[in-house]
Amino acid sequence: METIIFHIDVNSAYLSWSALKRLESGDGTDLRSIPSIVGGDMQKRHGVVLAKSIPAKKYGITTGEPIVNALRKCPHLLLEAPDHQLYHQRSSELMKFLSDICPELEQLSVDECFMDFAPIRQKFPSPEAAAAMIKDQIREQFGFTVNIGISDKKVLAKMASDFQKPDKVHTLYSTQIREKMWPLPVSSLYMCGQSSVQALLKLEIRTIGDLANTDKNIIYSHLKSHGLLLWEYANGIDKSVVTSTPAEAKGIGNSITLPKDVTDRSEACRCLLSLSDSVAGRLRKASQLAGMVSVEIKYSTFQSVSHQQILLSPTNTSGVIYETACRLFDELWNKEPIRLLGIRSSKLTAPSEPVQLSLFDLPAAGQWQTQERFPSTIDLENRPVPSREKLAALDKTLDSIRQKYGSGAVMRGSFLKNRKDE
């Protein structure tokens, strides 16, 4: 049976939800009908356009650009401060509505999700009819609109939902990519950011079709693994499936929105080290070991990507989590400016449960391992690496000091150096 996937995306979610709140409070101005944006305080890293109205788009205003730039383009632009509590509430209401229609739902962000059509296939004459019903019910019940993309592949459903807006249903099946997707500029391909676009333009690759028909080895030589991902997407290759997350899923994580966009690996790794300390500390406080670590990157364009890895042995030590996070970061980062970094641990177990040791936990006879365990932060070449037990003992000692004298009582030397440079 053919796989059918919906991608459901709220049109200008933040702006739509803020507009509805204003209308409900008696304000006669609908933000969606005038040049308006949702943005905020520059000092708090919210000084960029988070969402824009269709009239604002006509002035060339783009999501992610500084508010000061947007005001230059349209001096009479109306600015609305973000209300993240409201957005969380509206998102929860929408996802509850959609999960009641079909339980096979994978939420990507506050305003978008994938839905597997299979469980509700028998209730509708066609996928298009089902999508139209869902779209219309959302508009009538909640007062805002969505676009729904339909395909046999997740990435193509995502691309389809970005076609003409708002309040539309579009299809983009694998058999339609030559006609509907290949003529589009390569910049419209999902996950193809500005730096990737510039690299492809230098290769005279201007459309998605150009990319799809270029030797993938040439793409790899210029853009490495991210280039291969773009080449696969351009050819409609995507083996991922809709994965619904059970409500009882547990995990401990932390993320940080950076004071300025980061383009340097060493600076990103310092952030990952701080996050690893935080996540590991919370794991120890909860008496949990993590069997999986994932890293999230949100770019300056507000695109988010993540990667995860199952650990050979469950852990709550900062060093192991940091080492894993750096490895995942290197596999994931496409060299574009980073706005947010996050680390999350999952597959949690209690320390009392039996743990299968990894061969890498055992030092070679008569000597310590000498592999680098803390890339980009400490030079450990030709230095012995402590055993897992010693790392755990060190973490326990640091925890007790911080508990007695405060979180700032002990700090890594790399962070002290960073403070001195500020």
Image: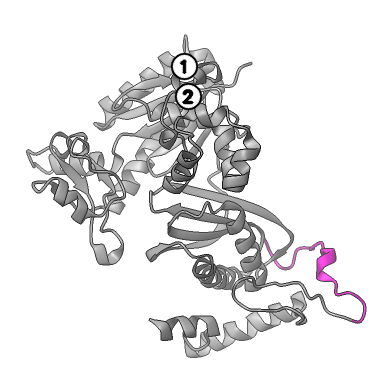
Q: Which secondary structure type mostly characterizes the magenta part of the structure? A: loop
CB contact under 8 Å: marks 1 and 2 = yes
Which amino acid type is shown beneath numbered disc 1? Glu
Location of mark 1 (residue): 179
Location of mark 2 (residue): 182
**Foreground of the two, 318 or 136:** 318
Using the image, tell me which numbered label, if any, was put on residue 105. none
Name the image quarter holding the N terminus: top right
Place residue 141 in its image quadrant: top left
**Foreground of the two, 373 or 166:** 373
Residue farthest to the right, as pictured: 365
Magenta part of the protein: which range?
A: 348-366
Percent of width and height locating residue 106: 51, 37
Graded by Cα atoms within 10 Å as few (under 14), some (14 to 19) or many (20 or more), the crowding at tag 2 reads many
Which amino acid type is shown beneath numbered disc 2? Trp
**Foreground of the two, 415 or 314:** 415
Please, what secondary structure does the residue beneath circle 1 have?
helix
Percent of width and height locating residue 326: 61, 63
Percent of width and height locating residue 108: 47, 42
Whether residue 63 is visible, yes or no, is yes
